[in-house]
Image: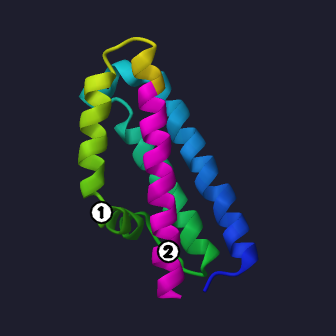
Amino acid sequence: MATEQQTNKAHLIIHGAAASAAAASGAMAQGAAFGADTVVLTTIHVGMVLALGELFGQSLDKQAAMAILGTPAGAGVGVFGAKAILGFLPGIGNIANATISGSYTEALGWWCFNYFDEDN
């Protein structure tokens, strides 16, 4: 079970990643249908997984982080579809994409936290 210190650090890691993902997706909303933010979001998500793994004393490489991210990837398909549809609406699309990516990253982060916590 995670310690209070691990949980507090996880909050910083996950909220930081979610804020970064929201900012990136909000800025690139009109290109969401073409996957404009995919590389940036993948980098943010991999970094978050690596940091969470380190928090639990697990040394991961990028390939291992990508494998972990692949487990809950089915939800990402729906996220991509919603972002692609809404992204074409200037202003509204930017806000929607930021909200969707931030929320998805937050949920993904806590899923990964639980994954590492159970594995410990």
Camera-near label (2 vs 1) is: 2
Dividing the image into 4 quarters, which one contains the N terminus?
bottom right
Relative horizontal placement of residue 16, taking residue 95 as reference (left or right): right
Quadrant hosting residue 51: bottom right
Instruction: Say which residue appears at 43% left-offset and 43% top-offset.
Output: 41
Q: Which residues are magenta?
A: 96-120
Q: Is label 2 in a helix, a strand or a loop?
A: helix
Instruction: Say which residue appears at 69% left-offset and 56% top-offset.
Output: 12
Disc tally is 2
Name the spot of residue 37 as percent of width and height, x first.
Answer: 39, 33
Residue at label 2? 114
Assess disc 1: are there few (<14), some (14-19) or many (≥20) residues with their C-alpha within 10 Å of its C-alpha: few
Question: Closer to the N terminus: mark 2 or mark 1?
Answer: 1
Colour approach in the figure: rainbow
Name the spot of residue 73 as percent of width and height, x first.
Answer: 28, 57
Query: Is residue 16 inside the magenta stretch?
Result: no
Whether residue 38 is visible here, answered yes or no, is yes
Name the spot of residue 52 as percent of width and height, x first.
Answer: 57, 68
The amino acid beneath tag 2 is: Asn
Query: Is residue 118 inside the magenta stretch?
Result: yes
Residue at label 1? 70
* Above/below status of 70 relative to 93: below
Q: Is label 1 in a helix, a strand or a loop?
A: helix
Rounded to the nearest angstrom, the CA distance separating label 2 from label 1 is 15 Å
- Comparing 47 with 69, the one in front is 69
